[in-house]
Image: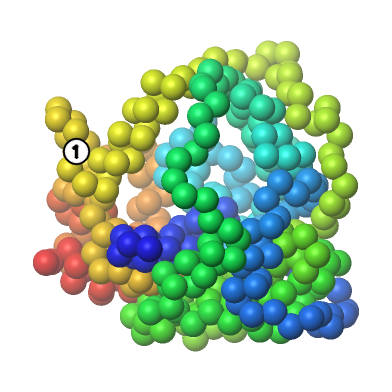
Amino acid sequence: MNKNTKRWIPAAVVPVVIATAAVAIPVAADASPALPEKTASQVLQLIATSAGTPYSGTIEQSSDLGLPDLSAFGPTGDGDGASSALELVTGSHTARVYVGGADTQRLQVLDSFAERDVVRNGDSVWFYDSKAKKAVHVSADVSAEPPSGAAVTPAEAADRLLAAVESSTTVEVVETARVAGRAAYQLRLTPTDEATLVGSVTLSVDAETGLPLEAAITAVGQDSPAFSVGFSAIDFSAPEAGLFDFTPPAGTDVTEKSVTDADLATAKAEAEAEAGALPEGVDAPQPTVIGDGWDAIVELPAGTYTASPEGDADVLAQLTDAVDGGRAISTSLVSVLITDDGRVLAGAVGVAALQAAAAQ
């Protein structure tokens, strides 16, 4: 596995969990079921076998970042902007999820007197916001081209992942647990880098199906997770097929979009540009990764941050503090620095580390 891949695997854990937003799930009294012993590689192999498993369940989400709870206001605006992103990572949230297979999924995020839905049925995807009374329907018209590259077995994939993180992370199977009434293995990733704010990441993996049931991130020096996301209830029977047929309610403003092979080619070119030189004529800002491992810092160039709409500006003003060279948000796990020249730096490190990187 190449150096770039080694660099982004640990750094990707925090933003992924933040984007999902998180919660501690109550467990049954029998919190440590007896299970056959497995190595970390074997648990990762078990996760790989869960692809395509049908299920439905309830996900409870909460966070303890030290940020004010914005969830009482529900989804803000039309779903765009910094305030909407912050709403997803503060307070508590509940969602229902249905998975019928590789191409049938439904996610319902339940807000106060409202809900947001993402429904996929084959090549058709719906995004619906009941509060805004808006929906976007995306239809795909692409060729069924098989993926390229050499195939790997679950065991090989597990070994590659462990090899990629071994220099910066201790990976071990710790005590077993029950999550949503299911017996689970717990896989813990502990950074060896003292500069990061992340103390550990724990994945609870269903012992029978291999499906991850809960993910939790604990900050350095804390006992309780600062972020976690998991099931409070789960059913492994196949959901009703009708759940994946979506019709927007009367009065919904519907926007139709389509995705073609040309769109996919453009997306591929953009992804390749992020890893190297930009295509001719393209001058979009590209992120720079400073360092590697858990203390990696992502920097967006000058001019990335500009004045936000008034609502977002008010939220950011309340959450940020003035520091040398700009304004910063500091949480138990992640810090963000917005410099005076419009650069944005973020990472699972303290603000001082971001300021030092910005000064280079």
Residue reaching furthest to the left: 360
How far from the left and from the top, in percent, is residue 95? 71, 47
Q: Residue at x 36, y 35 (%)?
A: 268
How far from the left and from the top, in percent, is residue 132? 60, 27
Give the colour scheme of this rendering: rainbow
Q: Residue at x 77, y 60 (%)?
A: 209
Left or right placement of residue 291 versus residue 12 in this view: left
How far from the left and from the top, in percent, is residue 171? 53, 79
Residue 10 vertical position relative to residue 31 in the rendered view, above or below? above
Q: Residue at x 27, y 45 (%)?
A: 274
Q: Residues within 10 Å of mark 1 (few under 14, many from 20)?
A: some
Q: Which residue is mark 1?
A: 278
Which quadrant of the figure has residue 29? bottom right
- Quadrant where the C terminus sits is bottom left
Asked whether residue 116 is in view, the answer is: yes
Element type where label 1 sits in the image: loop
Q: Residue at x 39, y 78 (%)?
A: 168
Residue 30 vertical position relative to residue 61 in the rendered view, above or below? below
Viewer-nearest residue: 260 or 152:
152
Amino acid type, residue under disc 1 in the picture:
Leu
Viewer-nearest residue: 88 or 46:
46
- Quadrant where the N terminus sits is bottom left
Viewer-nearest residue: 314 or 275:
275
